[in-house]
Amino acid sequence: MIIQPKTRGFICTTAHPDGCARQVQRQIEYVQAQPAIHGPRNVLVIGASTGYGLASRIVASFASGANTVGVYFDKAAEGARTASAGWYNSAAFEQAAQAAGRKSYSIVGDAFSDEIKAKTIDLIRTEIGSIDLVVYSVASPRRTHPKTGETFASVIKPLGETYSNKTVNFHSGEVTTATIEPATEDELRQTIGVMGGEDWAMWIDELQQAGVLADGATTVAYSYIGPEITHAVYKEGTIGRAKDDLEATSQRINEKLSATGGRSFISVNKALVTQSSSAIPVVPLYISALYKVMKEKGLHEGCIEQMYRLFNERLYGSAHTAVDDRRRIRIDDWEMRDDVQAEVSQLWADLTTENVYELSDLEGYRREFFQLFGFETDGINYEAEANADVDIPNLR
């Protein structure tokens, strides 16, 4: 079929297999051009098919030579419907990893469920033996609790009072004011239920109890803080409270793992174009301004550059991993530089519909959004027929 992008708000409902494969290959080539990392040998990535999770898996495999297990919830093509971008990304990764001689396995299903945890543990025990790095990079709007059966739905809202600020329709370039009503207590509870640390702790507990978590293992989950511009809707809103819970969970996991020489970290990453960030009001406009400043300063990084730097400079680059006063790895350090934020704030004050393309990198944001789904990728003929029905090697 000929596959073109079809959008609904901040979601693209189609994905291009060849474009996704090309994007994955470019990330692999970037990593292969960097110095090797003396890092993990057997890695489990929970939320492995897009964004930081996918980049983590690529760095582990192609910089550290690790065997990997990826858990993710993506769908294959069916009839006239393409597969999800994560499906195509994972197929491309699996093919490349196995061609390079790495053990590599994919498990598709609900990472929150007991069934998928048990299936993953069985695979690790049978094929790899044990895991020495667990990356938790799950981004989901909903979670069904495996014990109680309650389904939680997350919201992106401020707390306490109504919040208003600039936002942009990145398809049209229209800058408007977004006004968001505060979350209720139950909405906050449910957001923490989805995006907090409970499921991460369940994974670590079950891996440890099953005897497939190696002594001295490391685990890391990803978070974001951001600047004052976004705090009301992010750091100080429902998502921020969920991330506070994630941080508290990391401390508890670290205490547990330290008995066998293990470690747990939160990595605070840079703002990037992802399916999740595209859904948060204000954030796409902030990222567009940030991209302009960081590209002009030669500081811009995508997911793969961030994850290579995290693995190489922080997790495995020295005897002691540098953390802040809350034991967080700050790989957002370049974004949060005083000079970067000062220039972004100056741009922010002046941004309007009329000048948004001049004062920000909105075009770069829009292009990266479509590249998440395999579109607008150099070297791909989007007028040609493409095979949407792609198999994932070693799918379990």
Image (cartoon, helix red, strand yellow):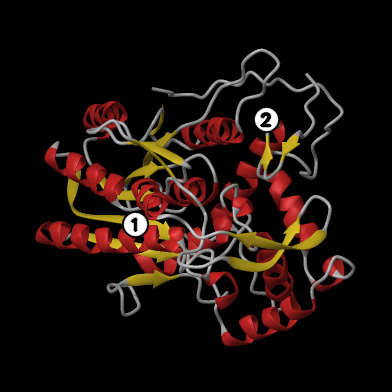
Give me the disc on residue 17.
2
Count of numbered badges drawn on the protein: 2
Give the structural element (helix, strand or loop) at label 2: helix
Q: Kindly identify the amino acid type of the residue bearing the numbered disc 1.
A: Val
Mark 1 surroundings: few (<14), some (14-19) or many (≥20) residues within 10 A? many
Residue extending furthest right? 354
Residue 20 position within the rendered picture, expressed as x and y whole percent measured from the top left: 66, 37
Of the pair 259 and 269, the residue shown nearer to us: 269
| Figure check: 51 above or below 160 | above
Q: Kindly identify the amino acid type of the residue bearing the numbered disc 2.
A: Pro
Q: Is residue 175 left or right of residue 335?
A: right
Q: Earlier in the sequence, mark 1 or mark 2?
A: 2
| Figure check: 308 above or below 342 | above
Of the pair 204 and 178, the residue shown nearer to us: 178
Mark 2 surroundings: few (<14), some (14-19) or many (≥20) residues within 10 A? many
Q: CA distance from mark 1 to mark 2?
A: 30 Å
Q: Is residue 5 left or right of residue 159?
A: right
Q: Is residue 194 left or right of residue 387?
A: left
Q: Which quadrant of the figure has residue 219?
A: bottom left
Tell me the quadrant of the picture where the N terminus can be found.
top right
Give the structural element (helix, strand or loop) at label 1: strand
Residue 67 position within the rendered picture, expressed as x and y whole percent measured from the top left: 36, 40
Which residue is the site of mark 1? 220
Q: Which quadrant of the figure has residue 115?
A: top left
Residue 223 position within the rendered picture, expressed as x and y whole percent measured from the top left: 43, 61
